[in-house]
Image (cartoon, helix red, strand yellow):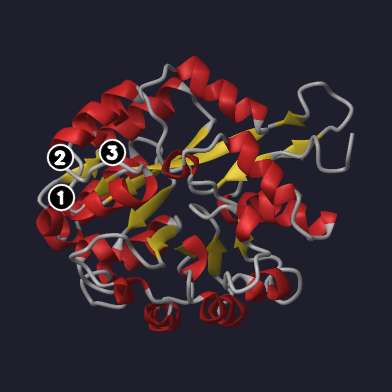
């Protein structure tokens, strides 16, 4: 057994598990996202195809938990997405996320989606999901909101996250829609946010790719800004010209405490265990790998994860 075989994993961006209620919402795929169907699932991007495709992906809780166990995932972030005002509908409802999280207490990290264009009403909903239903974070996607992360419509929601003591995960990457520019996810938009909200726990989802160097600089500069790696195959991180060189360099030095492992396994169509094997194969020091896989996330989320290499289960939570 290697030194990494039994370490726990915190997946900071699953963010979808294919239960019946989540797939029912998935069938209502927002039209601006159809490009994702073409790129990731190799399907003709039509809403009818989405509905048939989603129904065929449904799995029961037992199978989903078994896959997490096989990858030693002790926590997995799942989230709602609500961009009704700018995309014509919710993608995944907070209600569906709550149902899954409540059936498996302590296994998932439920984040809320919020339609920020609805202002005070949406702020009240965020507070409800956190205070009454046990949600532990907020998730926002600028490319679906059609406004960059430093647009002032976001600011009351950042302030609410600070007030509630929860992190916000914000899409920070290129996007695969054909109707929204990728520039909406550029890391440059987060510098002002982190300056204006120094206490905000800010997660740049997808690590700012392809602008990884800029994202690494922000994580170095701002104490509460983190980079999450999901929806990218780790086996490509070392490929020449792939753009991940800054992460492999600075992620083992100046920002080693700011990198969060995430899989995006559903989007990639890969098992969590397979993606974990790819991550373990990277040229990363074992102590740094543990930080990426769970220690940094545990510190950020306040999760008490104690490790026992001698037990067959591998972890105690």
Q: Residue at x 36, y 25 (%)?
A: 57
* Image vertical order of residue 113 relative to residue 116, above or below: above
CA gap, disc 2 and disc 1:
7 Å
With 243 as the anchor, is 313 left or right in this view? right
Disc number for residue 31: 1
Q: How far apart are the two marked residues, 1 and 3, measured between alpha carbons?
A: 20 Å
**Percent x, y of residue 61:** 45, 18
Q: From this view, report whether residue 90 is shown above or below residue 100.
A: below
Residue under pointer 3: 94
Image quarter in which the C terminus is found: top right
Name the residue beneath numbered marker 2.
Answer: 47
Q: Are marks 2 and 1 in contact (CB under 8 Å)?
A: yes
20 above or below 158? above
Q: Quadrant of residue 131?
A: top left
**Pointer 3 or 2: first along the chain:** 2
**Earlier residue among tags 1 and 3:** 1
| x, y percent for residue 298 | 64, 49
- Residue depicted at x 13% and y 51%: 84
Mark 3 residue element: helix
Q: Earlier in the sequence, mark 2 or mark 1?
A: 1
């Amino acid at each position: 057994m290697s030194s990494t075989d039994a370490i726990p994993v915190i997946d900071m961006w699953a963010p979808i598990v294919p239960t019946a209620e989540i797939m029912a919402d998935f069938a209502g795929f927002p039209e601006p996202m159809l490009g994702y169907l073409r790129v990731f699932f190799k399907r003709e991007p039509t809403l009818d195809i989405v509905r048939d495709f989603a129904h065929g992906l449904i799995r029961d809780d037992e199978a989903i938990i078994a896959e997490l166990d096989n990858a030693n995932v002790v926590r997995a972030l799942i989230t709602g997405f609500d961009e009704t005002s700018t995309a014509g509908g919710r993608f995944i409802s907070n209600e569906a996320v709550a149902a899954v999280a409540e059936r498996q207490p302590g296994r998932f990290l439920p984040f809320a989606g919020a339609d920020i264009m609805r202002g005070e009403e949406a702020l009240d909903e965020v507070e409800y999901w956190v205070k009454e239903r046990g949600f532990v974070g907020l998730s926002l996607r600028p490319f679906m909101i059609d406004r960059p992360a430093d647009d002032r419509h976001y600011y009351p929601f950042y302030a609410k996250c600070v007030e509630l003591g929860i992190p916000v995960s914000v899409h920070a990457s290129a996007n695969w829609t054909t109707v929204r520019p990728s520039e909406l996810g550029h890391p440059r938009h987060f510098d002002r946010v982190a300056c204006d909200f120094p206490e905000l726990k800010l997660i740049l989802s997808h690590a700012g790719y392809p602008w990884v160097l800029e994202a690494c600089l922000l994580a170095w500069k701002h104490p509460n800004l983190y980079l999450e790696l999901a929806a990218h195959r780790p086996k490509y991180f070392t490929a020449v010209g792939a753009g991940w060189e800054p992460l492999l360099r600075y992620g083992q030095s100046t920002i080693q405490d700011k990198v969060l492992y995430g899989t995006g396994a559903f989007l990639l169509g890969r098992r969590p265990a397979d993606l974990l094997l790819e991550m373990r194969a990277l040229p990363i020091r074992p102590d740094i790998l543990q930080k990426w896989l769970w220690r940094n996330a545990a510190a950020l989320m306040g999760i008490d994860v104690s490790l026992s290499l001698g037990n067959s289960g591998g972890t105690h939570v």
